[in-house]
Each structure stands twice: as structure tokens, then as C-alpha cells.
Image (spheres, coloured by chain):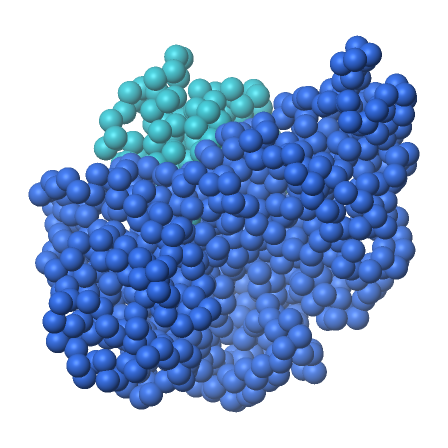
Amino acid sequence: MHTSKTKIGRRAFIKNTSLAGGGLVLGFSWIISCKNTSKQSGKALPKDWVEVNGYIKIAENGLVTIMSPNPEGGQNVKTSMPMIVADELDVDWRDVIVEQAPLNADAFRFQWLGGSQSIRRGWEGLRLAGATARHMLIEAAAKEWQVPFNEITTKGGVVSHKQSNKSAIYGELAAAAAQMQVPEEVQVKSIDDFQIIGTSKKNVDGLKIVTGQPLFGMDTHREGMLIAMIVHPPAFGLKLKSVDDTKARQMPGIKDIFTINVFNDDYEKAFFDTRTFNEVAVVVGNSTWEVMNAKKALKIECEPIESSTETRDRFGRKWEEHTPAGLESTDEHFALMGARAAEPGEVRRKDGDPERAFKNAANIIEASYTAPFLAHNCMEPMNFFADVTEDRAELVGPLQKPDLTEQTLSARLGMPIDKIDIQMTRLGGGYGRRSYAHWLVEAALISKKIKAPIKLIYTREDDMTDGIYRPSYQAKFRAGLDADNNLIAFHVKTGGIPQSPLAQNRFPAGAVANYLAEDWTIDTNLTVGSFRAPSSNFMASAEQSFLDEVAEAASKDPIEFRLELLGRAKADPVGENNDYDPDRYAGVLKLVREKSNWDTTNKNLHRGVSAYFCHNSYAAHVLDMVIQDGKPMVEKVTCAVDCGIVVNPDAATNLAEGGIVDGIGNALYGELTFKEGVPQKSNFDTYRMIRMAEAPKEIEVHFVDSDMAPTGLGEPTFPPIFAAVANALYKAKGERFYHQPYIKYLS
Amino acid sequence: MATFNLNINGATHEVDVDPTTPLLWVLRDHLNMVGTKYGCGIAQCGACTVHLGDVATRSCMLTVSSVGNQKITTIEGLSENGNHPVQKAWLEVDVPQCGYCQAGQIMTASALLKNNSNPTDEEIEMAMNGNICRCGTYTRIKKAIKTAANSENV
Ligand code: FES
Ligand code: FES
């Protein structure tokens, strides 16, 4: 064991026996600010006492309830986070019941779903939560049995003292343990002693899912609840002018039709408060079908928006967001990006003398890549339940950044946070979309206005045409090889509408003596935001396709070529701030080379390789493709991941597989185009999603054996698979694929 | 509005609704049986799959008036305690990620196995083609279907 200083500090630990009905509740500061007690007293506790929180309840019979702090959207944190607590607590996993913790921003700093951060940021706090409780149980035993603390051991929820032949289950000691001083230091397990971490545990909600129990926001039901839907302008660049509800209002089951302003004019929007259609029409009625019908009968008239600039707040940093007027189209977007790419960009990093190096190069390779806007297409459309009165608000549903949304809502309603109760349900997919929770605000405003509990539902069409899309991107690469085929110069110029995807300190920065990274942006009135592995999902596709082309020009094996560069980055790194560890990066490439039998050839199999580092983890893929009746079919993907310690291997494998399948789907088919501001797809009849027959026949996931603290997995396997597809397609078709979705360019 | 007597999961339910209402919304809104999911409303994603008799059917485009006295089975009625071989296989393979599409996947898969107890990969792919999973659990779904097919009494 090694000793870890509890960063939380003793005053942050609160003992509270009143909640557990005789058992012990070992909680952190937020317990006292739980819903039915005063949240004001919680406020008196400074926020930074608590880094991360765990929540443990022990029943007399030894059952343990562990609260899972973060929202669950398919990454399986509801199983893996409590596993970490349980291991340090030293209980039998079968005795553990998992509950979703309530939102409490006073206590949890990152009660988020996003950025592959749940496990990474949770790791230390979850271990401490378990270890601290275990420590206090041992102290209780030491006191009761009058034996030294250090002679006591625990195993599977039992405390034992060998010398005196005494033992007790945790449940028997729980009440006494609650009286113990919260330790300032606790021992956490050494990695070799983990019993639960590193073993595969089944999804704790598995049975509920396969039996169709209500788990999702869409499933929320309350007595007297009404259904609400919105009607938004049909095109970006338009705003509501008037609403003619003469017909819709007469339709059966309709209670009311009105408009709402999602944000007030003078409100300074925070990072996730993105919304273009600030005013939307609302239809409220008794049932979904009736509201859907009335919605179709509603006539709205729209007018063009004016250009505007507003100041927004990014976690304390202000930025100016410019929204141009006009009705935008995809053709024009690509023309604009092409023109912008011909101009100089903003230089973000420069090593050596790139222009001279290019002048001296024996061979220059150039290529440019584009990618379209993408819709998130969570299978559960956006929705939220709200019951809001003048002085309190109850909200139930799926969202990714609950504490931030709570602040937004508090500002919009002019209601203190302690009067707002946001309950998190399981998310039917998030992928970034549910960080932008304008629909929660809409639900609250609707409920308040109609004075009834309501469930706001976006139809699939609303979900797709009122999205927060993945931006559209362009990237231009140049590589210079010397006469011996060494990469001596590398230039990337990239940008997007409206965001740049550049990560200038990422590989191959650090591996090339002369390196230049520039970027640019183009404004838009389309709304964009995070989409599974933001920016990386494009940069990896472009950069890893390009490196394949450069390796070929240098007559080198694409894995060997990358390893050579990584060797340089390790032995003699160029520049500073390179954001990756060359050894770990090389590690996944070597592992995937071995596991995929890269060095054997099969002429019917077209193989593409790709690797990337993002969201603190490393992933590499080898994708094997065959062409069947002219169609690309993925036979197998071999994947290597380094995400540190793997908490729940089978669940981690599932998530890695998901990133691969989702990535292949988006690379081949994902696209949302616009014409005069109107999204050209609004449902799955036209928006092509990958289906079973197009998914890889086999996926093999290998994890690098590691004793490093775990990092995330929701995103890292996603970005590199795009280029693995492109590079395999090249092998199959003899031509390079520069533009997504690749299916459009497959002859 | 009209009254319909629906035979769902072995029990009769009386509802008074607009006859054009899709069965999906009758289940979800009027009977609070929310296991059957809404994903697209146009028979493209399979989230709303139920059994009509023994046949997997998209309930989002099936009007309540067209059901008549056909037997409807929803995910809630597939088995008593989640012990249908397909559900058991789903748990064994630990298929779900977010889980939202899974009720529909299971209903399609169980209808497939009812008609074809030992489907080939191609038959599985064909039967499951109407069910989208954005989380990308397809390889596990296929594995679970094979696991269920190999188990007894499908
Ligand atoms: S909701 Fe019926 S098929 Fe999508
Ligand atoms: S498990 Fe999430 S959509 Fe299938």
C-alpha cells in the first residue's frame, strides 16, 4: 500500500447518520446539502474543499449502496465508477447496489459526461471515498475490540483481527464507524491488490435495459403531465415573425400555443448556452400524437436575422461571437473554405525554418481534406420534463453538464439554485449534444407559463434540424522529404466553420525539425458544438490519411514510418509543449502491428492503419477491408488502446467497439448539408446511419497493460478509425479519399 | 376519439383515442408502457419494435385502429423477469451501451429466432437491418443473437 494524502481535507467530511436508518452514511460535504435538507448550509462550505465525492451507505446486513456521481450515457460509468469505490472499500461486488447520485454542484466538480473525463477525473476521489470509509470501519473495530489498528485486516466486507480471533461484517460496525474522526490520510490499495478494478463486471442497469424499464428522460411520466413540442424557423438565418395558430388551436387535445424566448436579450451566454433560434413557438397538449398533429398545422412566418455580435463567457474568459445574417448553403461553405485556405492563416506554432526546408526538399507531398457538418443523432431525441412554479423548479431528464445547465436555468428564471432540482436520467446517447441544454430551459419556461408539469419532446425532425452540429472543416497539408526520404518539413493549415480543429502541439509536431501550423475560421449562423472527440474527429482523419500518403511517397511501411517519427520525438524532441508521450503512442502502434499480424499479407484484404492521441488516451487501428459487389465491407478491426489502468475490461471493450463502429459510420455516410439555411436531411430515411450489415464482422480490442492512472475511453477510438477507413479504401480502390463522407466518392 | 380493446402482453387494455394514433404513442402516453421507444416515427430506426402476433412490427407507423384483436407483445411482456433466452443472451454478452435502442433490437431479434432458430450471419444482418444503434453495439448484438440461438428453448 502507499499512503495518499486526502486532498479533500477533514472539514469536508461530514458524518450523517440520519439518512441511513441505522446504517452508516459516510458522505462528503454535499450530503448535508441534499435535496430535502437546506442547500443553504451546503453553501457555507467552500467549493474547493471537495475535489470529487463518493457516497457510501452500509446496511446492517452488509449491503452497500454506492452512488455513481456522473451522468450515464452508455460509457458505463454507472458500473465502473462505483467499482473503484467498492475496491478501496474492500467489499464484495455482489453486495453493492448502485444508485445515480443527485446533482450537487457544491460538492462535485465534474459531475459531467464529456471529454472522456469521468474516470480520469473521478479516479482519485473515488478511491479516497472507498478507502476513507474502510479506514473508519477499521478504527471502529479497533476501538470496540481494544486492539491495535494496524493488526486489523479487511476482506470482502469483513473486518478481522486474527490475534484475538474477532471478526465483524461492515454492517455491524457501520454505526460506530460513523462516530470516528474522518482521517486526514488514508491508505489506498496498491495496484496489485485490486480485487474489482481490472475485472469485468456487468452493466448494473443491464436487466432494466433488456426488460424495458423506464430509465430515460423520454420515459418520465407524472400524473397530469402535458406534452410540449417546439416549432422553430425552418432555416438558419431566419427568426420567428408571427405565428398563426387559428387551426392548430382548434385541434383535439391542444391546451395552448405560445412563443418563448429561450434566453433574455441582456443575458451573457455561457459556453454551452448555444442557441440560434432564440424565439420558438410552443404547442402544448394532452398527448404526443395530438401535439405532433397540431404542430404540423401551425403556420409560422419568419424573417431574416440581422448580423450580430455578442459577448459570451467561456468559464470566465470572454469571447465575441459573431453571427452573420444570410441563408447559408453547403456549396458556398466549401467555396469559402477553399478560398480562405489559399490565404495565410494565424500561425500557431513554428519550429525551425519550414519555408527553407520546403525549398530544399527533394519531394513535396500536398493534399487537402474536407468534412461536412454532422448531426449527433442520439437515438433518444432531445427531451426534458419540467414542473416549474413561481418559487421552485423540478426538472428530470438526460443531460451532460447538469451543474452548468442549472446555473443557466437559475439565471433565466431568476430563481436561486437551491430552489432548482435537476434529476439526471440515463441518456439515450449524448456524444456532446446534451451539453447544450437549451431544451431544458425551454421545458422550464413552458411549464412555468402553462402552470403544469410538462414533458418537452423534440421530434426526430426537430432533433436533426435544430441541432448543435459538428462543424465543417478543411485542412491542407504539405510534407517535404529529403533525398533519403526523411521527413524534413511539415505544414498544416486548417480551419472550419466556425471553429478551427487545429491542435498544434500534437504529433507530428515534435518529430519534424521544420514545422508550421496555421489556422483560420469562418463565421456562420449555424449552431455548432462538441461532437464525440471534438476537433480530433476531423484532425485525425486528415492527418492520419496524409501520413499514409507521405509514408508511401517515402517508400516506407506506414507503421514503420510513424514509429520512426515517434523515435525522433522521443530521442530529440523538436520544440516544446508536445502534448503526447512518444513511448505510449509508439506502444499502441506496436501492439496493433503485432495483434493484427500486420506483417503478413493477404491480397484480398485491404488494410489501413491509423493512430491518434486525444482525450489523454492513445488508440491505433488496423482495418481490414474487402470489396463485395463493389461495396466496401469491413472484415475486421484490430484496435490497440492505452488508457492506463482499465477499470472494467469488457465494458471498456464495448465502448472501444462503439467508437469504431460509430466512426466507420460517420466516415462513410455521415453528412448534413444545407441549402439556403435549410438542413437537407431531417430523419433517418435520408440521414444514413451505419447499420449492422455495414459494421465490422469482427472487432478485436487490446489494451496496453498499464499501471498508470486511468484515462478516458468514450472518445479516443473514434477519431483514428476515419483514416483507417480512408487508408484501406486507398488500398482497395487505388485512389485516395480526401473528402467525407467517403461513400459519395466511391465509384 | 374511439374506443379500442387492445390485447397487449396477454391482457386486454381499453383505450379511448384518436383512431389514427400510432400504437407507439398509445403504449407510451396512454398506457404508460414506455419500454417501446420513439426514435424516428417513420419506420426507419426500429426503436419502436413490438410483436404483432409473431411478427416484428414498427409501432410508430401502425395506427391503433389497424391492430384489431391481434396479439401485441412489447418488451415488458417478452418474459416474466427478463428470462427470455434473448434477454439472457443480451445480459451475458453485456450488449447495451446507452441502451435506448436495445428494446427494439431485442424485439426484432426475438421475432427472428421465433421463425428461424438458427439464423446465418446474413439472415441476422437482414433481419436486424432496420434497427439503428448509434452507440455501435452491432457486433455484440450479433453475438448475443447467436448465443440465444444456441441456447435451449428459444
Ligand atoms: S420510431 Fe419506429 S422505427 Fe423509428
Ligand atoms: S445502445 Fe445506444 S443507441 Fe444502441
- Residue A213 % position (x, y): 59, 34
| Residue A32 x %, y % | 86, 48
Q: Closer to the camera, A198 or A117?
A: A198
Q: Residue furthest top?
A: A165
Chain identifier, colour cyan = B
Q: Write down the quadrant of residue A569 in the picture.
A: bottom left
* Lateral position of residue A572 relative to residue A362, left or right: right
Considering every residue shown, the one lying at the far front of the view is A571
Give how far across and how far down residue A706 sits, in percent: 46, 41
Q: Is residue A146 left or right of residue A202?
A: right
Q: Is residue A739 above or below residue A53?
A: below
- Residue A632 location in percent, x, y? 19, 49
Residue B105 sits in quarter: top left
A170 relative to A13, above or below: above
Q: Residue at x 85, y 50 (%)?
A: A11
Residue located at (66% from left, 53% from top): A111
Shown in blue, the chain is A
- For the point 24% across and 26% down, which residue is it? B120
Q: Quadrant of the N terminus of chain A?
A: top right
Q: Is residue A599 visible?
A: yes
A227 relative to A333 in the view: left or right = right
Quarter of the rendering occupied by the C terminus of chain A: bottom left
Query: Residue shown at 56%/79% (left/top)?
Result: A240
Q: Is residue A420 above or below residue A148?
A: below
Count all numbered tags in the image, as a single digit. 0
